[in-house]
Amino acid sequence: MCRNIKPLFNYEPPVTEEEIREASLQFVRKISGFNKPSRVNEAAFYAAVDDIARISSRMLALLETGAVPKNRNEENVRAKTRAAKRFRRD
């Protein structure tokens, strides 16, 4: 999985359409191998981003859980702390 694609389910505040689109863009970049598509591939590239964003939004709306939603800010702090430990230079 792409490191830049973050879990989007069961967070408070809920995921935004922009976050879903960003994750979709990262996914299409990964599987296509393009950071930015050429003009000839641009329509197919962005159509795929749109399709994946739409499908992802629908899936997230349908998922159910009994777990308490995670706090997005607390999770971001935890991730930064883990990254700092992981990439620390001694």
Image (cartoon, helix red, strand yellow):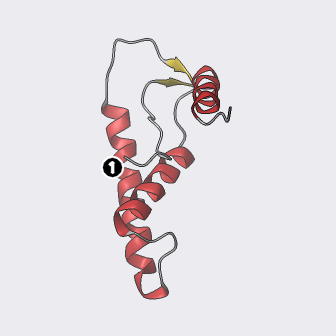
**Residue at left 65%, top 31%?**
84
**Residue at left 41%, top 72%?**
45
Q: Residue furthest front?
A: 90
How busy is the neighbourhood of tag 1: few (under 14 within 10 Å), some, or many (20 plus)? few
Q: Residue furthest bottom?
A: 40
Q: Amino acid at mark 1?
A: Ile
Q: How many marks?
A: 1
Using the image as rendered, state which of residue 61 and residue 31 is in the foreground: 31
Using the image as rendered, state which of residue 77 and residue 58 is in the foreground: 77
> What residue is shown with label 1?
55
Whether residue 16 sits left or right of residue 68 in the image: it is right
**Residue at left 41%, top 81%?**
41
Q: Position of residue 36 (x, y in %)?
A: 52, 73
Quarter in which the C terminus is drawn: top right
State whether residue 32 is above or below residue 69.
below
Whether residue 46 sits left or right of residue 88 in the image: it is left
Using the image as rendered, state which of residue 13 and residue 82 is in the foreground: 82
Query: Which of the 4 quarters of the picture holds residue 24?
Result: bottom left
Q: Position of residue 22 (x, y in %)?
A: 52, 52
**Residue at left 51%, top 19%?**
70
Label 1: element kind: helix
Q: Position of residue 9 (x, y in %)?
A: 42, 30
